[in-house]
Every structure is written in C-alpha cells, then in structure tokens.
Amino acid sequence: MSDVLDGAIRAQDNKSIRRPTSMTVVVCIESGMLEPLTLRMVDSLRRFGGRFANLDVFAVTPRLTPPLARETHRRMEELGIKHLRVFPKNPYAWHHYMNKAEAIVAVEERVTTEAIAWVDSDILFLQEPNGLELPPGVDFLASAPDAGVIGSRGITDPNDPFWGRSAALIGKVSDDLPWLQTGDGHKIRFYWNAGLYVYRRNTRFGKNFLSDFKRFLDNHVARTHSQVHFMDQVVLGLTVLRLGLVWQALPDTSNFPVCSFLPGNYDGAKIMDASVLHFHDSMEPELWMKLINTLAPGHPRIREWLEPQGPVALPPSISASLARECLRLVRGARRRVYYGRSGFTKAWSRSR
C-alpha cells in the first residue's frame, strides 16, 4: 500500500490496537462500473475500517470479461487487493448475481481465516464495522432488506406462492421460514440482503450457496423476471436454513441503504451511527450531491475524502465498451431462452 494510505490507516482512532478479526473480504470485479466502485469500497475500508482496515481482500473475476483497465490494476496493487481470475463451468453465467456465489467458492477454497465476508461494490465503510464480527456460536450474519419487489409479509401477500415454491426447494413450506424484522418496520419471511454477509468458513456455506443457486434455476422456481433477478437473496436464506446454521440479523447500522427507491433515507440523522453505507445508485451524477449532503452532518471525514472524487465513471476504453456490449447481448439472449423455457418473458411484475 502507498505511504499516504498507510498513514491514513495509522491515524485512525486507537481502535486499531484491538485484536484484528480473522476474516477475508470477497468482492467481484470485472470490466466496467465494478472497477471504480470496487476501488472506492476497498479504499473506504482501508481508511476508515479501524481494526478491519488491513483485512485480506480478494477481488474475483469469475466470468468472461474484457481486461481490467491498467489504472484499476495499479490501484488494486496500491490498496493491497488480491485479484483472482477463475473460469468455472457455469451454464448460468448470464445471471449477473451468480458471480457472487462463484467468487466466494473460489476464495473459500484458498484461505484459512475463521470468517468470510461478502461485500458488494456499492458499499462504503464509514467507521469501524464492529457488528460484522461473528459472535461465539453464530455461523452467519446478514441484514433484512425492505420487503421490496418479492418479499412476503405472510399468507395474504401476492408474493407468498413464490416463497412456498422456494421453501419446497429445501423440503420446507413457507410457514417453516423464520420471520425477520425489516428496517422499515415490517415482518417478512426469511429474506436477507445479499449485499453484505459474513459466515464461518468451515461451514462451506459458499459451496452450498452456489449449489442451491443452480438448483433454484434448474428447477425453474421463478415465474417472473423479478424472481430471477433477486433470487440470490432468496437462496441466501434457504441455504442458511438447509445447513442448520446459527444465524443473527445485523442491525441497520451495519448495512444502511441510501438510494433512489428509499428517498427518505437521504437524512444525515438516520446515518449518524451507521458504520456501513449501502449506497446503491447514489454515486450516479443525479444523486451525487444528495449523498454528499447526507454524509456531511455525521461523517465529515467521509465527505472530505469522497467529494473531490466526484460521481463514479466508467474507465475510458472504446474497445472494452464494445466488448462489454457484445457480452451483454449474448447473455441477454441466453437469459431470454431460459425465460422462454420457464414460461415467461422479461417484464417486472408482482410475484405469483
């Protein structure tokens, strides 16, 4: 890492003298917007993560992609990110969240730390994220999302038949699924946010998650595009239950969402105690200043570091852009074939 970055880490509060946790961070990276997003996420961890700042970070590229930009490779080296390129045989590479499962499997097989933390690239660490450490006897940590497009609040919810089919995948019915409390005050069936979760490596959760992901698609559980799109979050909980893992819900402060579809969360008071910010689309130009102004009251150091960088932007490369567009078209065609075999087309709709 650079001297400047090392200095920023050493300058953090005395929290850094506490025992570091035995954890490996995993994230995906491929050509395109994941490049600047991943670099910002890891930079925030290194600068503001306290005793978590120096964790090993693996950025995995688990499917075909144009080469990463030269500047991306330079910054990954500077930030101490280990780049892992793998080539799994995956008939569902068109599913853009399948790469998460492939990534954690690849890292799970290579490290010896007690825990593995999956972290989406659209996340910022605002301060030391102590809530992410696994308590004794707990195997899995994640946070409940809002009910969203496919969550179910119970038997009268239009989404509930989908949850019945999903539960059947692991030999259960929907009423066997535990209830979770969302940040916006609703009870939903066992449905985690897949943007950040932590698990004990020796449970081999990653390997099982990938297997269940493929079984979900093999068995055509989804009946709408939205059910396919968000299925990684559904399968996440199903795998936890199938393996009998001891789980614990993270507080909102450990994965707080700020995004266009939750406009009320652009509120400095609401993120005052947050250690992990899940900003989703908030680094796009249209929402950039809303994000910056939301950070200002409670997290001036983050604003001071972030604001000069401006909104995220694609690395400038015509050849990479053309290659990504070709891959997008090919993957889109394969996804349409799958949808056709499942009996529906790509259209956002309520679940059934």
Image (cartoon, rainbow, N blue to C red):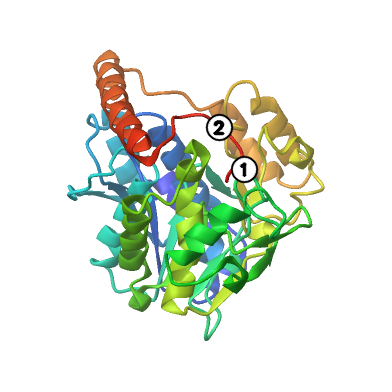
157 or 17, which is in the foreground? 157
Q: In this view, does 209 lie above or below 6?
A: below
Q: Which residue is drawn at 79% across and 57% down?
A: 185
Q: Is residue 88 above or below residue 289?
A: below
Q: How many labels does the image show?
A: 2
Q: Quadrant of residue 201?
A: bottom left
Residue type of the residue flagged with mark 1 = Val
Q: Residue furthest top?
A: 318
Judging by the rendered image, the residue that carries numbered circle 2 is 348
> Looking at the picture, how far across and down is residue 19, in whole percent?
50, 77
Q: Residue furthest front?
A: 343
Judging by the rendered image, the residue that carries numbered circle 1 is 149
> Looking at the picture, how far across and down is residue 324, in whole percent?
29, 24
Secondary structure beneath disc 1?
loop
153 or 319, which is in the foreground? 153
> Looking at the picture, how far across and down is residue 205, in whole percent?
37, 69
- CB under 8 Å between discs 1 and 2: yes
Q: Is residue 48 above or below residue 265?
A: below
Q: Which residue is drawn at 37% across and 46% down?
A: 2
Q: Can residue 49 be seen in this view?
A: no
State which tag comes first along the sequence, 1 or 2. Answer: 1
Secondary structure beneath disc 2?
loop
